[in-house]
Amino acid sequence: MTAILQGKHISKEFGDKVILNDINFEIESGKKIGIVGSNGAGKTTLADMITNTIKPTSGQLLWQYNGMDIGYMKQATEYLDLEETLSGGERTKKLLTQLLYSKKDFLVLDEPTNHLDYEGVKWLIKQIKAFKGAVVIISHDRFFLDQCIDSIMEIDQGKIVNYNGNYSFYIEEKRRRYESQLHLFMEQEKLKSQIRGQIEELKGWSEKAHRESRKKAIATGNKFGGKEYNRVKAKKKDKAVKSRIKRLEKIEVGGLIKPEEEIKVLFQLEATKKVGDTILQAKDIRKFYGNKLIFNQSSFYVKRGEKIGVYGVNGCGKSTLVKAILKQVPLEGEIRISEERKIGYISQDVLDIKEEKSILQVFEATNKEEERQIRMALVQMGFSNDRLYDKAEVLSLGERMKLKLLILIRQGCEVLILDEPTNHIDLHVREQLEETLKDYNGTLILVTHDRYMLEQLCDKLLVFENQIIRRYEYGIREYLERKEQKQVAQDEAHRKEMKSNKEDKMLLENEIAYIIGQLSREKQGTPMYEELDNKYQELIKKRNGF
């Protein structure tokens, strides 16, 4: 397959910080490539260079031909000049539709599924598969990457590592490569240990041979034979020692280095106290925006310790419900939640962090011990010590979301309300967050388009259906399966109805033809003619009703 773009020895630096270091890559015609990597690794920087938004510090981007028409959807849809009345998902879908139907040669999409609901993601997967050109996608959506990506380019410590498969293949192959490299490294270390042991043993033999040579010389009055034999023996041992030292040095210089294991992000979430059984009770709630009904006459409850997902199409009112629970927007009806309970909330807006503060200052530590704990937590989340004094304004969207998560974690809340908490954050941190939320002993209300996260965490759902919020006592997988089965049953019933209608129509046409034949034999004005004509008119009305 023809390469439409080649990157040769590409490097990019911002000041004294190296983002990409002498990378090489190819993008073939028609390929669908996912770019993954930790927050701040350089994914968006690479996308900006491919789309000529910024220039590399060194290296070349070689296109198959000049004037290639490139479509680029940036990550920060908050900046889009689209109707303010549209939800984030509706704005994202509108921009994607414009790009996909604009007959571009090449697309670069940075987090295209952020804000898209499940149906929107399915729509996008279908569109990308049908798109004939190459597509480069930066995404943290595992379901999406599994469905529409041919290969993965991982950016790790300024370098690119290629994986020829979807996200699930990438995870398994990365683990296999790590284990293989670790095995080879351990075998190398074992060999080095053996060589060091041999060196020490040979040194001991050499020293013994030298001592015996000197003793022999004294005993024989320095007669040549005895002395020479032991001297030669000692020299052989010295030569063997030098040979093994050289071998060891060669391994030290050109040998394998220990493969780095991903840092474990040790979130610690624990509710500070347990109060009552029912955390939240909604009764006959209804919400309008102007004359537009968002949801109507809905009642539901959430019990202590439940992990409940909020599911629905874009614009149905999920974020509105969250804001109503937090008493940020008014509505009709009643939502009761104890004011004694400490509620932690993360919105999908990552631009609300005070940008003039440093990463460390955002947390406003009150003493040295608290600052030490914050430093440790930040390092675990992927922030190096030398970055802790960087201004928040230089952080990527994913790094901003990590800060918001850490701020929330430190509050010790009985109830967590998370509105798209995984938007922008890298896959590794996302998976670690899932593991932490599984063990969280408080109540979780989760709004997310991440199908995998919903499956992993939530065994109850609040679903927006036909402007009603309904509670279901099972998770997203069972809900979607039941919905699909119901749709299949409805389609089958419709098919049978259409088939039955078709057969009935054929019988009706035959009856109409028979009546027309009878009419042709009767004279107009006779009672029989009038009776047949009335029957004919009834049949025509019946046929028009199909």
Image (cartoon, rainbow, N blue to C red):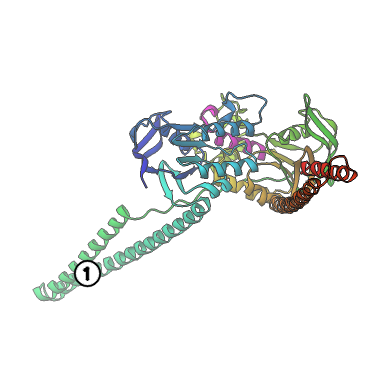
Q: Can you name the residue that lies furthest to the right here?
A: 527
Determine the residue positioned at 24% across, 67% down: 207
Determine the residue positioned at 47% across, 40% down: 135
Q: Helix, strand, or loop for circle 1?
A: helix
Q: Decide whether residue 402 is among the magenta residues.
A: yes
Left or right: where 317 falls relative to 19: right
Q: Is residue 30 visible?
A: yes
| The quarter of the displayed image where residue 318 is located | top right
- Of 143 and 382, nearer the camera is 143
Quadrant of the snapshot with the C terminus: top right
Residue 430 picture location, percent across and down = 59, 45
Residue 532 picture location, percent across and down = 85, 45
- Residue picked out by circle 1: 211
Disc 1 residue type (three-letter) = Arg
Residue 312 picture location, percent across and down = 71, 41
Q: Is residue 371 visible?
A: no
Left or right: where 138 falls relative to 450: left
- Of 140 and 109, nearer the camera is 109
Disc tally is 1
Dominant SS in magenta: helix
Left or right: where 400 falls relative to 71: right
| The quarter of the displayed image where residue 340 is located | top right
Q: Decide whether residue 242 is among the magenta residues.
A: no
The stretch in magenta equals 389-409
| The quarter of the displayed image where residue 353 is located | top right
Vertical order, 498 against 8 (above or below): below
